[in-house]
Image (cartoon, helix red, strand yellow):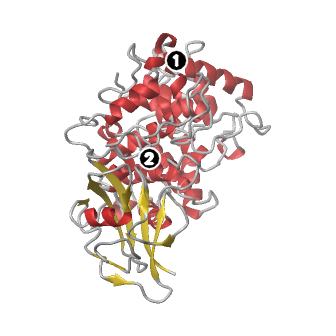
Amino acid sequence: MSRPRTPRRLALTTTAALGALVLTALPAFATSTPAQIATSRANGVAYLKSLQAADGSYAGSGLSNEWAFSAFAAAGTAVVDVAPGGDTTKNARTVYRTLLSTSGWPSASPVVTDYERGILNAYAAGIDPARVSASRNLIAHVYGYWQTAEPGYFGPSANFNGTVFAALALGGAKTQAGGARVPQALTDALVARVRANQHNDGGWTYQKVEGDPTALNTASDIDMTGAAMAALCTSGVPNTDTDVVQAKNFLKGKLVSSSGAFNSLYGVNTSSNGWAVSGLNACGINPQSADFTTVPGKTPIDFLLANQYNPGGGFKYKPADTTPSAYSSIDALRGVVGGGFTAAPSTPVTPGAPKWVAQSSFTAGTATKLALTVDDGAGNLKVCSVSFTPTGTTTTLGDVLGAATTAAAPAGCVTSVTPASGTGTITAVNGKANSGSQTWKVSVDGSAFAGATRDKVINVGDTIALRWGA
């Protein structure tokens, strides 16, 4: 399945639902009613269910239909409940988890957006992305693309969307309890790079423009503006922030009065509208507010609904098209139902199906990865993926740091640890020693920082943050 897109859209189409808007309490000036939106949601979900293959799969080559998981989550449908012919043994979540666990996934030459796609969709499906299997930790894979020479970028900085989607994936895929998974220092580094790449017109494109006055003055596109503003808000930036307001104003200035569409670089289309609406949704900005209602009374939601086939449920890519597009349908539906770029899964209705599935322990002898950050308190943040082979069902912080000295990507995350063995307090990392109240502390999966000891138990999929300070 394909649609007219640029190469960067072939690299990464998006995901759905951070902070859904309440569909039953729209203001008086909204022109698409809650009842119309509810109908669109029901028909859209039915269409996305029709995309499932007979073996239960959604993922495939190219722009894969697994992006439907983000729309399902935003629409309140649990992915584990989506099964061909009601055969629960082939439910979409189980089939996708099996795929993510295979050694050949995503490809022989993966890029960072492959793993970001996996995080966003696994999370929406109810698969803990750090604990897909004994060998697969998607969070750790993304950490491995940290750019040491350009801190804050993930993957080649020229392909800026890799950094935008790192923010969306690492910030949007919370822990199973709903907490932040990564440390604030990493979030701050990502936010700084997103801000630095905002064009003078208030939007973004998929390309790096930081430090280039000419590039900063070029035109932004609708799609990446939606994604980048969502990246900021997903990272905790409020919608009153100057950069978010500028992005909102950029989108507002691109409204087509007669239809409520956004005038995209790719022409008026539902996918670009869906990305923009998802950006607004993620920032808690109502796409049917007065700001986004044209003089004739049209909103971006009106445009999306006008391009949906009913009762079939699919959405056209462009108004002149005569058949629905799978990817446009995904992009459009998650916007219509209030989704951003990923969402926690809904509670399943399938008897016995848990909301979350996750690997519960290491498997001795099975190689795996862990995500690690080292913050020296002086602004020198190191980020890496640590490869090691556990010898039991758990490991220790000391063993992880030891492995990091020789098997970290990027290299240099940990160069030395004192003491180098035993079970006691860690007194120095990378040559920086404890000093009075300024000591090395550790946080796991966003827990409160506490004194770092070599015998600190580390479990499968733990996201580890070391920090020097009070």
**Total numbered labels:** 2
* Between discs 2 and 1, the one toward the N terminus: 1
| Image: 69 above or below 165 | above
Looking at the picture, how far across and down is residue 444, in whole percent? 47, 60
Q: Which residue, as the protein is rendered here, is positioned at the far right?
A: 28
Residue plotted at (59% across, 14% down): 310
- CA neighbours of label 2 inside 10 A, class few (<14), some (14 to 19), many (20+): many
Which element carries disc 2, helix, strand or loop? helix
Looking at the picture, how far across and down is residue 61, in whole percent? 29, 27
Q: Is residue 425 visible?
A: yes
The residue labelled by disc 1 is 47
Q: Which residue, as the protein is rendered here, is positioned at the far bottom?
A: 436
- Judge by depth and name the residue closer to the eye, 165 or 143: 143
* The N terminus - image quarter: top left
Q: Quadrant of residue 403?
A: bottom left
Looking at the picture, how far across and down is residue 95, in whole percent? 40, 25
Which element carries disc 1, helix, strand or loop? helix
Residue 224 disc label: 2
Q: Amino acid at mark 1?
A: Tyr
Residue plotted at (41% across, 80% down): 378
Q: Amino acid at mark 2?
A: Met
Residue plotted at (39% across, 77% down): 376
| Camera-side mark, 2 or 1 | 1
Residue plotted at (33% across, 72% down): 422
- Judge by depth and name the residue closer to the eye, 420 or 416: 420
Q: Quadrant of residue 96?
A: top left
- Judge by depth and name the residue closer to the eye, 97 or 118: 97
Label 2, label 1: how far apart the Cα atoms are: 26 Å
- Judge by depth and name the residue closer to the eye, 121 or 260: 121
- Asked if marks 2 and 1 touch (Cβ < 8 Å), the reply is no
